[in-house]
Image (cartoon, helix red, strand yellow):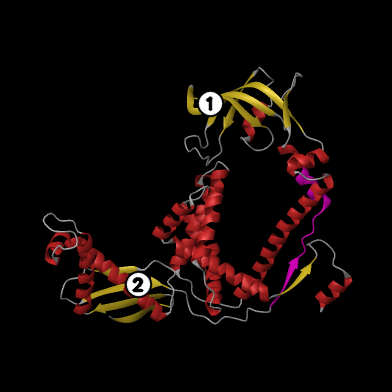
């Protein structure tokens, strides 16, 4: 095999490959031999079918597999010799192998640009201390009390209010025809928690138990159900039950029920530790980003277009999920898809620059990612999404996403390495006064 490299741009390469006929024949013979071992052809013992018979019967499959296997093998060899890691899919332009004939093909791919790394070890960075106030603990306790609240029927004659749980029947009508799917019986709704449209909750709050309320409800533009987006319907609601929540007392009994704590103070102490741990993680992440931003400001290099486009796709996928959770669609943004992509270009470019920089640090430090680490990450992802870990790994392998996951783990390792070498100073949270000594040191 011989090849030549053409630089199309600072981040794009084209490789022209020539394979002599002898290597072509060897690849075809090797694939034919594999087919001979498993070929089941009437009149011949398995494993003893003549090569000519196997070639005649499976010619198309043999040529396809031999071509693919040869190119894949040579791709790994070429990439190792070039010492590059493609950041895009590799486009292959080739025909099929032909016995006794030289074989030529080309590959095109984008790669990370070359640039000089600034000094990234021993840098000074400030991190806010994880301070937890009593008010924050109180809010967590109140949320837990709300989750553990018991509901009881309201016997007095009154309208529903925020904090109540109501059981309702409802149906929507528009143009004198009932909207399919917009009706329900014994629907349970916690008022004041954003579980339904504000106008729907407002209508419910005008209706006493056993009564019916009728009002007009306009669905917002970009509503997840496009048939209802921007439409106004007549909504009829019957309140069948009103239930109030009875919060448990903030005492030792609550601590015991919530997690088997000895007393209420131990319960609050556990909450303080949990909140402090979460804050510490967030503060560390913020400090790491500040450190990384300072380093990124010192370098400049061209970005592979495919990496930027892939990042835009990811940003839009995340945005779609966020809108979906809010019961909205892209239409609710009032912009064309092309406009949204253009708006996200700067964020995608920033992501690409960060990825390239961190992978360069990882290469400089000879960082690696083991199969065990990839499997562990897959298991965590599967647990969060409720998927089977093996099926998720198979999907990632087949779609080429395992390489992207490996790069992400590698980038995380690079961040942790720089953090471990940094000179970290803990400072009071924003808004809190620093001690005089700290102020003097900061001034210096």
Q: Secondary structure at mark 1?
A: strand
Q: Secondary structure at mark 2?
A: strand
- Please give left or right for residue 279 compared with residue 327 in the image: right
What is the number of the mark on residue 183? 1
Among the 4 quarters of the image, the one containing residue 247: top right
Q: Residue furthest front?
A: 45
**Any magenta on residue 306?**
no
- Please give left or right for residue 417 compared with residue 6 in the image: right
Among the 4 quarters of the image, the one containing residue 172: top right
Depicted 75 relative to depicted 229: above or below: below
Between 433 and 54, the one lying in front of the other is 54
Could you tell me which quadrant the C terminus lies in?
bottom right
Disc 2 crowd, CA 10 A, few/some/many (<14, 14-19, 20+): many
Q: Badge 2 is on which residue?
A: 108
Q: Residue at x 44, y 69 (%)?
A: 87
Q: Residue furthest right?
A: 436
Question: Horizontal and vertical percent for residue 229?
Answer: 51, 37
Question: Horizontal and vertical percent for residue 352?
Answer: 52, 68
Task: Let me know if residue 160 appears in the view.
Answer: no
Disc 1 crowd, CA 10 A, few/some/many (<14, 14-19, 20+): some
Between 76 and 287, the one lying in front of the other is 76
- What range is drawn magenta here? 123-141
Question: Horizontal and vertical percent for residue 367?
Answer: 54, 74
Q: Residue at x 53, y 49 (%)?
A: 385
Distance (Cα) linking label 2 and label 1: 56 Å
Q: Earlier in the sequence, mark 2 or mark 1?
A: 2
Task: Let me know if residue 436 appears in the view.
Answer: yes
């Amino acid at each position: 095999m011989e090849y030549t490299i053409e630089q199309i741009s600072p981040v794009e390469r084209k490789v022209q490959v020539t394979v002599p006929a002898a290597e072509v024949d060897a690849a075809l013979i090797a694939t034919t031999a594999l087919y001979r071992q498993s070929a089941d052809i009437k009149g011949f013992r398995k494993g003893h079918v003549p090569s000519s018979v196997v070639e005649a019967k499976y010619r198309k499959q043999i040529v396809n597999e031999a071509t693919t296997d040869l190119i894949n093998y040579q791709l790994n060899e070429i990439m190792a010799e070039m010492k590059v890691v493609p950041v895009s899919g590799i486009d292959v332009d080739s025909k099929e192998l032909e016995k006794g004939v030289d074989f030529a093909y080309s590959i095109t791919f984008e790669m990370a640009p070359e640039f000089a790394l600034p000094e990234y070890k021993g840098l000074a960075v400030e991190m806010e201390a994880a301070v937890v106030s009593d008010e924050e603990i109180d809010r967590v306790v109140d949320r837990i009390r709300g989750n553990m609240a018991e509901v009881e029927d309201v016997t007095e004659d009154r309208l529903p209010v925020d904090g109540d749980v109501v059981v309702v029947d409802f149906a929507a009508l528009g143009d004198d025809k009932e909207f399919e799917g917009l009706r329900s019986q014994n629907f349970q709704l916690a008022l004041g928690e954003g579980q339904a449209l504000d106008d729907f909750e407002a209508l419910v709050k005008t209706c006493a138990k056993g009564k019916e309320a009728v009002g007009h409800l306009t669905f917002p533009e970009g509503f997840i159900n496009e048939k209802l987006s921007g439409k106004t319907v007549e909504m009829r609601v019957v309140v069948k039950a009103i239930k109030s929540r009875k919060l448990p007392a903030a005492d030792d009994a609550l601590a015991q029920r919530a997690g088997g704590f000895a007393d209420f103070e131990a319960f609050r102490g556990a909450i303080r530790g949990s909140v402090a741990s979460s804050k510490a993680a967030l503060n560390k992440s913020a400090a790491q980003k500040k450190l990384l931003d300072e380093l990124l400001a010192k370098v400049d290099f061209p970005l592979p277009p495919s990496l930027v486009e892939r990042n835009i796709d990811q940003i839009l996928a995340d945005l779609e999920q966020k809108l979906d959770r809010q019961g909205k669609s892209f239409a609710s943004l009032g912009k064309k898809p092309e406009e949204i992509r253009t708006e996200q270009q700067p964020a995608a470019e920033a992501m690409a620059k960060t990825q390239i920089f961190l992978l360069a640090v990882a290469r400089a430090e000879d960082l690696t990612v083991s199969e065990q680490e990839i499997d562990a990450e897959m298991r965590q992802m599967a647990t969060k999404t409720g998927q089977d870990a093996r099926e998720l790994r198979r999907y990632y392998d087949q779609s080429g996403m395992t390489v992207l996951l490996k790069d992400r783990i590698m980038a995380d390792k690079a961040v942790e390495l720089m953090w471990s070498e940094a000179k970290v100073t803990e400072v009071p949270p924003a808004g809190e006064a620093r001690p005089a000594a700290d102020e003097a040191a900061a001034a210096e």
